[in-house]
Amino acid sequence: MKVLFRGIYRATLHIRWFISLSANKRIYEICEIFTSVSFAYYLEVNKMKFANTVPNAVLVSALLCLAVLFSLPADAGGISLGRSRVVYPADAQQATISLSNKSDASTYLMQSWVETADGKKTSDFIVTPPLYTSAPGNENMLRIVSAGAQHATDKESLYYLNVKAIPSVDKKALLQGSGGVVVATRMQIKLFVRPQGLTPAREQAASALEFTRKGTQVVINNPTPYYLTLTDMKAGGQSLKDVMVAPRSSESQTLPASNGSSVTWNSINDYGGLDKGQSPIN
């Protein structure tokens, strides 16, 4: 008697890339990109035992998931955001950001929402439309609307805007074939709520950073009311890790052996561009 077996295996992987692009290219500021891969494996078995079949299905599924993962582009499969960060005036009712589908043939289901700094979904902001279909060549405008939550009045507050792109699939072809891969990409950018009247001016904030040596560490102190992101930092010709320093807070980095007496860095500005700077290590 013929035996028919269909097994479904699903695997989800999450990764984050921090991308720093030069100022003369389209900027995606420390674009924290989370990618989830779901793989559905369908197997018809004739006169095979369950115990011998499942390990093979799992192995093939896992290998194909990894192959897809490491071949994913950073532009979310043709979906791109108009900016690499959102600066939201604290007294504004809403802010907008454009989202484009630059694919020639792919349609995506788009989903957007806002998270707090610790990664929890929040109702402090409502993104409209929260769910819609983006056809090839479409450009849509997302509206980020304040729900009236209270924020700090003397410094910036940090949130994250998330945009998830789910490609359309041919279900009939998927079911008729021996397997299929569906890739959903989540893009995440920073959303800064900025009160009016902060000092110094935002373009002068990075120059106020203070670097102090403590043993084998360098402490980066940010006395300003802004979140400041530093990339391409070097001390004594050696690279340091990229870092974001919260308002009126500090972060530490390990100094290389040849630490030098100064630090060079790039600071990401409101437009996603890079402002070069150099500071002494005190």
Image (cartoon, rainbow, N blue to C red):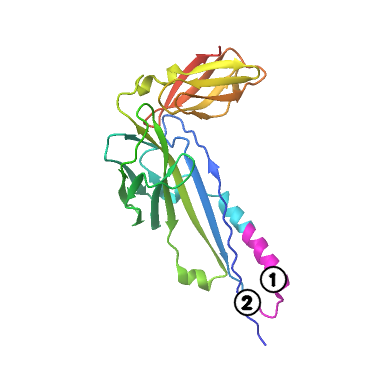
Q: Which mark is residue 161?
A: none
Q: Is residue 180 left or right of residue 189?
A: right
Span of residues in magenta:
45-62
Locate the N terminus and report the quarter of the image it occupies.
bottom right
Residue annotated with mark 2 = 5
Residue occupying the point 37% across, 38% down: 83
Residue 216 drawn above or below residue 159: above
What kind of element bears circle 2?
Answer: loop
Q: Name the foreground residue: 171 vs 89.
A: 89
Where residue 189 sits: x, y (%)? 43, 40
Is the residue marked by circle 1 packed among few (<14), some (14-19), or many (20+) residues within 10 Å?
Answer: some
Amino acid, disc 2: Phe
| 139 in the magenta segment | no
Q: Is residue 1 left or right of residue 281?
A: right
Is the residue marked by circle 2 packed among few (<14), some (14-19), or many (20+) residues within 10 Å?
Answer: some
Where residue 55 sits: x, y (%)? 70, 65
Residue occupying the point 60% across, 65% down: 9
Amino acid, disc 1: Thr
**Residue 103 is at least partly visible in this image:** no
Residue annotated with mark 1 = 53
| 59 in the magenta segment | yes
Locate the C terminus and report the quarter of the image it occupies.
top right
Task: Evaluate if marks 1 and 2 touch, with contact meaning CB atoms under 8 Å apart.
Answer: yes
Q: Name the foreground residue: 149 vs 189.
A: 149
Residue occupying the point 31% across, 34% down: 90
Sequence-wise first label, 1 or 2: 2
Where residue 187 sits: x, y (%)? 45, 46
Question: Marks 1/2: CA distance?
Answer: 9 Å
What kind of element bears circle 1?
Answer: helix
